[in-house]
Image (tube, helix red, strand yellow):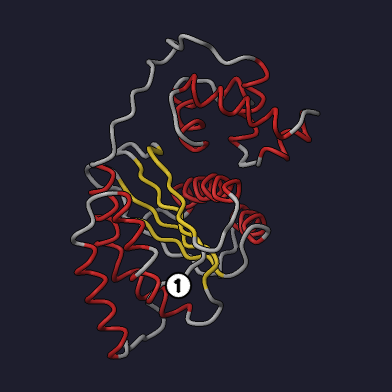
Amino acid sequence: MDDIVTPSARELEYLVRIIERAATVRTRAGWSSWSQGLLQTLLPHQAMVCLHMGERGQLLDAHCLHGEMAHAAQAERLRALAARLAAICRSQYGLPWAVGGAETSAALTELRREISGLVAGELLLHGSGELQGGASMFVLFGMPDEGRARHRYFIELLLPCMHLAWQRQAAHQPPASFPEAGALADPLTGRELEILRGLKEGKINAEIGLALGISAHTVKKHVYNIYRKLNVQNRVQAVSRAAALALTAQAV
């Protein structure tokens, strides 16, 4: 750490309580309660995207937790932006990483501009690195401008228990059942492949509809059909599964 941080007695008390509570997290509901409760005392944020990556770096899951954001579309957009951010950091910076506003990469600068249109405040990101059983990444959006050094300090300290708690809840999620490559019983239509390209680019339904000359409601129905055909639950999973099925290339 570049800055010396001396925790206060209150912060040390919070730190111990956060670690103690993390050891009890076993489910996604427990993770949500812990991360949006006690964790907020040392790492205040408006939204957090938690990513779970496989041993080969493939994105397995992305979950968005938010307190003040009202629209599900914003959560979907943040999940997509966090996935793009993970890819950039993996290729340009490596893991683990912590970003707090001093980035010079053109790609990161563009991403921060997109993010600022959804949620104001600082961005903090950290990841576990390549580990047996998969990696975790946590992107915190809408953090206060002040206290950046303290936030970086605490996310470094808390990363191990964040990773373990996130991996434990992932182990309790029902396993996804995906069709084998090339074995889709109901292939995607040309229009659905166009929609998939928009999902890959992190666009919301209204933006995809504007580009294709259709309504956001029609896009929503196509997205539902894409989820059904790929047997996925959200946009990040859809893009990841499409890439595994070599559908992403068709959607470019």
Q: Report the residue at 34% width, 60% height from top.
A: 33
Residue 232 is left or right of residue 10, and the answer is right
Residue 129 in percent (x, y) is at 32, 52
Q: Which residue is mark 1?
A: 44
Say which quarter of the image contains residue 203: top right
Quarter that holds the C terminus = top right
Tell me: residue 39, above or below residue 247: below
Tell me: residue 195, above or below residue 205: above
Camera-side residue of 33 and 56 = 33
Tell me: residue 231, above or below residue 169: above
Tell me: residue 98, above or below residue 59: below
Say which quarter of the image contains residue 213: top right
Q: Report the residue at 52% width, 36% height from top.
A: 235
Residue 56 in percent (x, y) is at 33, 36
Residue 215 is left or right of residue 93, and the answer is right
Q: Report the residue at 43% width, 64% height from top.
A: 98
Camera-side residue of 68 and 115 = 68
Mark 1 falls on what kind of element? loop
Residue 231 in percent (x, y) is at 43, 24
| Amino acid type for the residue under numbered disc 1 | Pro
Within-10-Å neighbours for mark 1: few <14, some 14–19, many 20+? some
Q: Across the whole image, how many numbered discs are drawn on residues?
A: 1
Residue 66 is left or right of residue 16, and the answer is right
Q: Report the residue at 51% width, 32% height from top.
A: 239
Q: Which residue extends farthest right?
A: 213
Residue 142 in percent (x, y) is at 55, 67
Say which quarter of the image contains residue 5: bottom left
Residue 224 is left or right of residue 175, and the answer is right
Quarter that holds the N terminus = bottom left
Camera-side residue of 13 and 56 = 13
